[in-house]
């Protein structure tokens, strides 16, 4: 089955700096890559996703890039703010199939004031 | 309001005592799944369901059962809970596996 590895497990940045979280996946058939944010004590929520027919997608301060050849994708957060502090999960699945959604192990991002 | 609900939110039980965690969604989603969340291990899928009467094992199905008799409900059954099933459980639903997953509020289970 699919295996998704996520790095780093913890990340601390100064407010206003950028943060980058990277994920690699094993199944070359995967073509849907979402990112979820989980604030302390709350449920995960989708913040951005990308499909394999595009290489980059942006939404205000967050962006995701995808390199299908290398089988990795990354989350970029610019101008970080304290409210960005949370656990971030990447995931991968195969669109249009019955396959499952496989999550990475998560990254605890702390934005220091 | 579109939502996924789970009950109970917190449960402390003893080894071997059968329990059911309910999950319900009102978005007419076909895909539903259960995850467990443990520190350092992320979200691991237990079971998923593509539609009514269609279920399949995820990455960690041992010790769990599910059923999907109605589209909106997807209960998780622990027939004989053990301490290693102490965890935070999330139910989720989506239109398909490759669409936004809407998570329930979570169920914190402790098995003594």
Image (tube, rainbow, N blue to C red):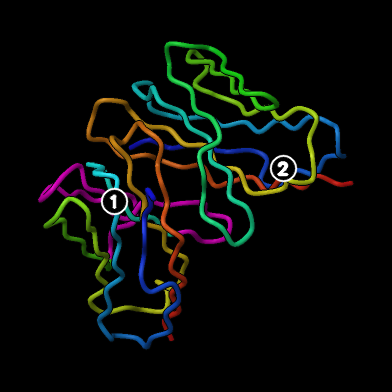
Say above or below: B107 vs A49.
below
Residue B61 covered by magenta stretch: yes
Disc 1: host chain? B
Q: Viewer-proximal residue, B49 or A83? A: A83
Identify which residue is drawn at 42% across, 32% down: A92
Q: Secondary structure at mark 1?
A: loop
Say above or below: B23 vs A52.
below
Quadrant of the rendered structure where residue A72 is?
A: top right
Q: Are marks 2 and 1 in contact (CB under 8 Å)?
A: no
Mark 2: few/some/many CA within 10 Å (<14, 14-19, 20+): some
**B105 sits to left or right of A57:** left
The residue segment tinted magenta is B37-62
Q: Viewer-proximal residue, B77 or B106? A: B106
Q: CA distance from mark 2 to mark 1?
A: 30 Å
Q: Secondary structure at mark 2?
A: helix
Quadrant of the rendered structure where residue A81 is?
A: top right
Disc 2: host chain? A
The image's mark for residue B26 is 1
Q: x, y percentage for residue A56?
A: 57, 14
Q: Viewer-proximal residue, B72 or B110? A: B72
Q: x, y percentage for residue A90?
A: 53, 37
Quadrant of the rendered structure where residue A16 is?
A: top right
Mark 1: few/some/many CA within 10 Å (<14, 14-19, 20+): some
For the C terminus of chain B, the quadrant is bottom left
Instruction: Identify residue for label 2.
Output: A84
Identify which residue is drawn at 31% across, 26% down: A95
Residue B36 covered by magenta stretch: no
**A63 sits to left or right of A35:** right
């Amino acid at each position: 089955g699919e295996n998704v590895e996520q790095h780093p497990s913890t990340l601390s940045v100064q407010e206003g700096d950028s943060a980058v979280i990277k994920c690699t996946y094993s199944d070359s058939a995967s073509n849907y890559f979402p990112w979820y944010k989980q604030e302390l004590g709350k449920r995960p929520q989708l913040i951005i996703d990308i499909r394999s027919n595009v290489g980059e997608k942006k939404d205000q301060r967050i962006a995701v890039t995808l390199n299908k050849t290398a089988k990795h994708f990354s989350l970029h957060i610019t101008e970080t703010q304290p409210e960005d502090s949370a656990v971030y999960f990447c995931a991968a699945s195969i669109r249009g199939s019955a396959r499952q959604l496989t999550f990475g192990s998560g990254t605890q991002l702390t934005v220091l004031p | 309001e579109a939502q996924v609900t789970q009950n109970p939110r917190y449960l402390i039980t003893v080894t071997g005592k059968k329990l059911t965690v309910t999950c319900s969604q009102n978005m007419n989603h076909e895909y539903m799944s259960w995850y467990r969340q443990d520190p350092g291990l992320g979200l691991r899928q237990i079971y998923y369901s593509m539609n009514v009467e269609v279920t399949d094992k995820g990455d960690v199905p041992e010790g769990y059962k599910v059923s999907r008799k109605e589209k909106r409900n997807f209960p998780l059954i622990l027939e004989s809970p053990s301490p290693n099933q102490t965890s935070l459980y999330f139910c989720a639903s989506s239109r398909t596996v490759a669409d936004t997953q809407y998570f329930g509020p979570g169920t914190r289970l402790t098995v003594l």
